[in-house]
Amino acid sequence: MKPVLFQLGPFPISSFGLFLLLAFLIGISMVRRRAATLGIDPAEMLDVGLYMIIGGIVGGRLGFVVTNLKTFAQNPGSVITIWRDSGLTFYGAVVGGLVVAFVYATRRRISLGALLDLIAPALAVGYAVAMIGALLHGLFNGKPTGLPWAVDMFFEKRHPTQLYLLVAALGIYLVLRSLAARPHAPGYLFITFLFLHAVARGVVEIFVETQPVFGSVTAMQLVCAVVALVALTGMSILGKRRPAAGTGPAMGDGAPGA
């Protein structure tokens, strides 16, 4: 573990923050390569991507504050010191990014679903990269285990839950790549990403050291169950719609190295 990689003046640069930045850069690069499929100038997509990142950080931070109200009530000033605790919630970040995407799609009069499909594979890859930082920082810590692939954390062997999530995210990316090569209704890729991520996160939560809130079920598993159910319903609805013109193989052109 190395939560703080180095100091930049009075600010500690966290390993999670650095890899989160790298995840953003990779995600924006992937989306820019495919922006032309929606008639969007790649330079414009850079601006949109940055606004979505800001929206995601604000939403993710708000979600973290809401879920840790007691802690922040004791020290309200720590709400803005994100560089110290790296406190973000994934679904809060998704909501924040969605708000920006909705505003942009409405103003440009383009399909919100198609825009989200453009972003979905980049989200999966970015999440995988961010999990490297989570491992270094000590987030989503696993339960003690004697398995051969356990990692040393807090002076004992633990499940490398961050690596479980990394592998799951890369698997989700491959699924999205496969689906992108086929005709699909706008929004289907993004909804599929939400479903697969919720399932993966809920399963990995079994190995995360956290307090249950209902029997052996944790708060994150309850959230994932709701997201998975909503996403599955959306997949069922979108799966019955006729694919939009232009969806298909071109959607996979923005993969790294493609």
Image (cartoon, rainbow, N blue to C red):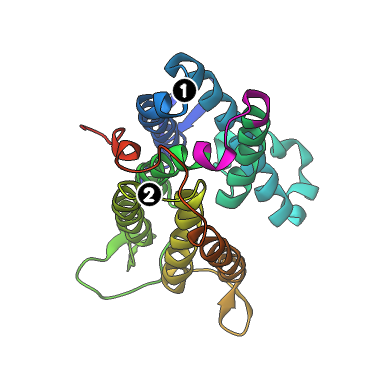
Residue 231 lies, in percent from the top left, at 55, 62
Is residue 8 shown to the viewer in this render? yes
**63 lies left or right of 34:** right
Is-magenta flag for residue 190? no
**Residue at disc 1, secondary structure:** loop
Residue at image mark 2: 183
Query: In the image, what residue occupies the spot 57% across and 61% down?
Result: 234
Magenta region: 106-115
Residue at image mark 1: 39
Dot 2 surroundings within 10 Å: few (below 14), some, or many (20 or more)? some
Residue 147 lies, in percent from the top left, at 24, 74
Query: In the image, what residue occupies the spot 55% across and 24% down?
Result: 48
**Residue at disc 2, secondary structure:** loop
Please identify the dominant SS of the magenta region. Answer: helix
Q: Amino acid at mark 2?
A: Pro
Name above or below for residue 11 compared with residue 75. Answer: above
Q: Nearer the viewer, residue 191 or 53?
A: 191
Total numbered labels: 2
